[in-house]
Image (cartoon, grey):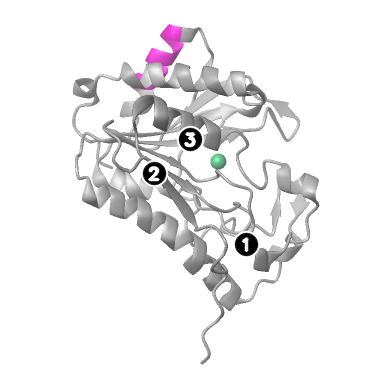
Amino acid sequence: MAQAPALLDPDEPPPFEVVNPGGAANLLLVCDHASNRLPRRLGSLGLTPEQLEQHIAWDPGAAAVARGLAARLDAPLILGGYSRLAIDLNRPLESPDLIAAQSAGIPIPGNQGLRPEARTARIAALFLPYHRAIAQWLDAHPDPARQLISVHSFTPRFVGQSRPWPVGLAYGRDPRLAQQLRHVLARQSDLLVGDNQPYAIEDAHDFTLPTHAERRGMPHVMVEIRQDGLQRPAQIADWVERLAQACQHIDEALLGEPISEG
Ligand SMILES: [Zn+2]
């Protein structure tokens, strides 16, 4: 059987980017939804340029915060190179939202009726290389006290409801890092910090932190910033500084032993 052509042409950007791989901080930053770029072969997936700027395609502002944190904390950072509409890097392979046929009520024509070969090509070209890069970096820098922080952004309103939290911290079975970070953030800035709001980490929807952090027993948290707070460079700089200071106040000794399922 002939091999399917590669999804990415040689002149297109790689499926992930590693920033500051030798960073001295005892944490790894990741940004799953950093980019709204689509592989050239996928065209626009049938969407308008305006739709491709929206949250359905990426997490606006998240990459800028993650890059700022990497520089401010001297931390390594791995970013996804392509839109979540091509494939969502934070969904399990069996999730129906891995390659969404619709998102937030908007049909994604180019993702509908996808042939198995096309699906396999996206997994091979985009999903596996990103997660292999994270796994390889962590395997090369083993340290159970290292933290894994995933940076995302969320819409101010969702299905008619406004979301009151300027920032949310999400966790699943292991709340250690989220709890500490929440205390520090609330103390330093008087902010309403979402506790597993607007999202929690769930096996059915999340892939990155359960796969890379929880299985290694690493403290981890998903940081979600509301997008109206990320519209201007000054706002982004404020978030970088606020989060960097909070990260610097994490007491590794208080993170204690890994919490196992049970
Ligand atoms: Zn996201």
Q: Is residue 22 visible?
A: yes
Q: 34 above or below 149? A: below
Q: Is residue 137 left or right of residue 235?
A: left
Give residue 108's position: percent from left, percent from top.
Answer: 73, 58
Q: Residue at label 1?
A: 39
How far apart are the alpha carbons under marks 2 and 1?
25 Å
Q: Which residues are magenta?
A: 180-188
Q: Secondary structure at mark 3?
A: strand
Say which amino acid is labelled 1: Pro
Of 44 and 221, which appears nearest the observer? Answer: 44
- Residue 13 image label: none
| Label 2 or label 1, whichever comes before in sequence order | 1
Whichever of labels 3 and 1 marks the residue nearer the N terminus, that label is 1
Q: Which residue is mark 3?
A: 151
Image coordinates for residue 96, horizontal then vertical, percent: 58, 59
Is residue 216 shown in magenta?
A: no
Q: Earlier in the sequence, mark 2 or mark 3?
A: 3
Q: Residue beneath label 2, please?
A: 209
The answer to which quarter of the image holds residue 183 is top left
Q: Is residue 165 visible?
A: no
Question: Where ligand 1 lies, by image quadrant?
Answer: top right
Where is residue 195? Give x, y as percent. 47, 24
What distance separates the C-alpha of mark 3 from that of mark 1? 23 Å
